[in-house]
Image (spheres, rainbow, N blue to C red):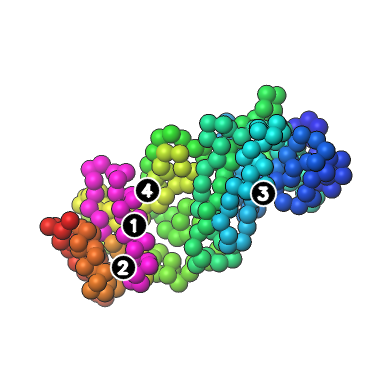
C-alpha cells in the first residue's frame, strides 16, 4: 500500500493477521506492527503530527496505569525485533487510511503523561505513555490528522487569556461537566482576579511546559504588581489544599524574580493547615462575605 490508500480493517487483518481490535496490532505473517489512530477519540487524545514526529498514545484504558508491556512493549521494542511500524488512521466505519511506515525515535522513544479516567472526572489521573514516531524514508507528512505540540528540550512559559475558563485545566478531558469543587474553584478565581484588577493590579495567567514534558501545566494566577503566585483549592479539605500547595512549590521555580506563594480558598482553613501554610511562607486568602477577601499572612521567619 502507498500512503493515502484506504482499506477495510477486517480485510487488512485477513491479509496479514494481527488483532482485529485495539490500537497496536502485531502481524504474525509479516514483519509489521500496525498502529491505528482515531482522530478525536479519547484513546487518541494525544495523537497527532508535530512537524517531525507523530505522537501516538499507548494502549490501556479504564482506571489502570499504562505499562510498557503487551502492545506497548511490542511497539517500544520494534527495532529489536526488526519490525516496521505501519500507521493507519480511521477514515469512516471500519475503513482505515494508510499513513506510512514509522519507527520509534531512539533518542526519546516516549514521554509519560497524566490521563483522565473516562466518565469519572473525580478519579485521580493515571500514568500513560505517548510514543514519538519518526517517519521512515519515503513516508510523507501525514494529512487529515491533528497537529500537536512537540516535546522540546527547553521549558516553555506561555501567557493565557484571562477569559478562558480556569476549569477544566489543560490536559483534562474535553466537553465534560465540572465537579462541584471545580465549579467553586472557577468562581473563586474569577472573583479574585476581578478583585485584583479592580484594585489596579496587573494579573496574568500562564501555562508552563517543562523540558521533555508533553503537557502544559496550568498556573492559576500571577499578580505581577505584588509578585504573588496564586493557586486555588476549591475545597479546604486536606487533599485539595495539599494539591494547591504542591502546585505552588512546583510552579514557583519557573518565574523570575521568584514570586511569593498565595493559596486561594473558599473559606478559612483549619488551624493545622493554616499552620502548615504559615510555616512554609504561603499566605492564604478567602472571601470575606462582603465582596472582598481576607488574607492570613505567612510567617516570614518560617523555614
Q: Position of residue 126 (x, y in %)?
A: 52, 57
Vertical order, 283 against 226 (above or below): below
Vertical order, 139 against 261 (above or below): above
**Which of the 4 image quadrants contains residue 164?**
bottom left
The residue singled out by tag 2 in the image is 265
In the image, taking residue 102 as reference, residue 129 lies left or right, namely left
- 68 falls in the magenta region: no
The mark that comes first in sequence, 1 or 2, is: 1
Q: Position of residue 180 (x, y in %)?
A: 45, 72
The mark that comes first in sequence, 2 or 3, is: 3
What crowding class fits label 4: few (fewer than 14 Cα within 10 Å), some (14-19), or many (20 or more)?
A: some
Q: Secondary structure at mark 2?
A: loop
Magenta part of the protein: which range?
236-262
The residue singled out by tag 4 in the image is 206
The mark that comes first in sequence, 3 or 4, is: 3
In the image, taking residue 216 as reference, residue 231 lies left or right, namely left
The residue singled out by tag 3 in the image is 70
Q: Secondary structure at mark 4?
A: strand
Q: What separation in Å lies between label 3 and label 4 (alpha carbons)?
A: 38 Å
Label placed on residue 218 = none
In the image, taking residue 186 as reference, residue 108 lies left or right, namely right
Amino acid at each position: 500500500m502507498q500512503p493515502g490508500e484506504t482499506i477495510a480493517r477486517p480485510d487488512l487483518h485477513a491479509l496479514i493477521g494481527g488483532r482485529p481490535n485495539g490500537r497496536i496490532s502485531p502481524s504474525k505473517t509479516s514483519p509489521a506492527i500496525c498502529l491505528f489512530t482515531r482522530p478525536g477519540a479519547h484513546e487518541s487524545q494525544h495523537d497527532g503530527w508535530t512537524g517531525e514526529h507523530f505522537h501516538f498514545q499507548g494502549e490501556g484504558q479504564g482506571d489502570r496505569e499504562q505499562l510498557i508491556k503487551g502492545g506497548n512493549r511490542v511497539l517500544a521494542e520494534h527495532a529489536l525485533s526488526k519490525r516496521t511500524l505501519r500507521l493507519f488512521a480511521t477514515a469512516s466505519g471500519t475503513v482505515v487510511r494508510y499513513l506510512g511506515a514509522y519507527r520509534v525515535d531512539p533518542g526519546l522513544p516516549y514521554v509519560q503523561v497524566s490521563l483522565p479516567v473516562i466518565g469519572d472526572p473525580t478519579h485521580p489521573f493515571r500514568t500513560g505513555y505517548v510514543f514519538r514516531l519518526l517517519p521512515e524514508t519515503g513516508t510523507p507528512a501525514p494529512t487529515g490528522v491533528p497537529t500537536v505540540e512537540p516535546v522540546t528540550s527547553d521549558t516553555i512559559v506561555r501567557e493565557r487569556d484571562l477569559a478562558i475558563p480556569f476549569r477544566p485545566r489543560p490536559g483534562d478531558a474535553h466537553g465534560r461537566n465540572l465537579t462541584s469543587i471545580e465549579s467553586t474553584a472557577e468562581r473563586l478565581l474569577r472573583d479574585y482576579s476581578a478583585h485584583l484588577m479592580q484594585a489596579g493590579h496587573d494579573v496574568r495567567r500562564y501555562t508552563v511546559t517543562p523540558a521533555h514534558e508533553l503537557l502544559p501545566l496550568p498556573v492559576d494566577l500571577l499578580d505581577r504588581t505584588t509578585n504573588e503566585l496564586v493557586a486555588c483549592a476549591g475545597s479546604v479539605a486536606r487533599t485539595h489544599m495539599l494539591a494547591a500547595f504542591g502546585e505552588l512549590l512546583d510552579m514557583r521555580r519557573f518565574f523570575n524574580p521568584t514570586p511569593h506563594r498565595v493559596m486561594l480558598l473558599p473559606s478559612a482553613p483549619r488551624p493545622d493547615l493554616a499552620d502548615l501554610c504559615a510555616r512554609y511562607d504561603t499566605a492564604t486568602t478567602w472571601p470575606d462575605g462582603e465582596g472582598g477577601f481576607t488574607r492570613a499572612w505567612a510567617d516570614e521567619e518560617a523555614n
